[in-house]
Image (cartoon, rainbow, N blue to C red):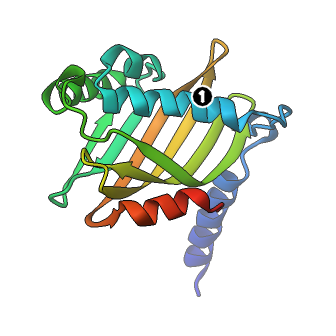
Amino acid sequence: MNLYKISNLTFFFAIIVSACNPPNDQKVQSSHKEISLDTLMAAIDKETSSFFAGNYEGWKDCWLHDSLSSQTWNNDDGSFSSAQGWEAIDKQGKDWIEKYYKNGKNIIHPEYFRKEIRSKILSDTSVYLTWTQYNAYSTKELYGVSRETRLMILKDGKWKIFQVAAFWDFKNKIGKDFVVHLMKTTI
């Protein structure tokens, strides 16, 4: 290997090491060891229930209105929808609530529940969460399963949603009896 290639490799690895190990003043240390999962999930639950109920103002209140906020999900036709920045999220959410949920007159998902909730405290003001969600369709006989993630940010003493990713299995719906069984088990 010639000196030029060694020099380029050394430079490449130096960039990787510095990106993985930022200077101490950029590292986030969490001194707040106890962030209530119940409080976080209550904020997330308010957003989900407001969205499914077609409550635009309730849904909107749960979000961090920031240019870096993001929302992404897959669609039943194999495509995906993504909104980057609060203005795009707000437009997409409001349009969806008005078009499909008819501002609460059309309840597509009357109930849901979550299993396998996991969280990671990133700092005193940010937490990452992930779970499996079971979403009832209008008759409550079939449920759709989704894998969900949220990045939550503490702003002015309230937990706000900064990022949503929701990936639904539109092809394989599950029956009510299986969901009732799942609700009784702890995972």
Nearest the eye: 46 or 71? 46
At horizontal 59% and vertical 28% (from top left) the residue drawn is 153
- Residue 174, position in %: x, y? 34, 65
Q: Quadrant of the N terminus?
A: bottom right
Is residue 20 at all visible to an observer of this figure?
Answer: yes
**128 in relation to 142, above or below:** above
Image quadrant where residue 42 sits: top right
* Residue identified by numbered label 1: 153
**SS under mark 1:** strand
- Around disc 1, counting alpha carbons within 10 Å, would you say few (fewer than 14), some (14 to 19), or many (20 or more)? many
Which percent across, then down, holds residue 111?
39, 41
Q: Quadrant of residue 184?
A: bottom right
* Three-letter amino acid code of the residue under disc 1: Ile
In the rendered image, which quarter contains the C terminus? bottom right
Q: Measuring 19% from the left and 61% from the top, which residue is drawn there?
A: 78
Left or right of 53 in this view: 121: right
Left or right relative to 149: residue 90: left
Which residue is at the front of the view, 154 or 62? 62
Q: Is residue 69 visible?
A: no
Total marks in image: 1
Nearest to the observer: residue 29 or residue 39: 39
Please say if 10 is above or below 82.
below
Residue 153 against residue 179 in the figure, above or below:
above
| Image position of 111 (left or right of 119) | left
Residue drawn at x 52%, y 33% as measured from the top left = 44
Across and down, in percent, residue 40 comes to 63, 32
**Residue sitting at the far bottom:** 1
Q: Which residue is drawn at the image coordinates 38% and 19% (left, top)?
A: 60
Against 22, residue 49 (above or below) is above
| Residue 107 image offset from top left, x and y in percent | 25, 34
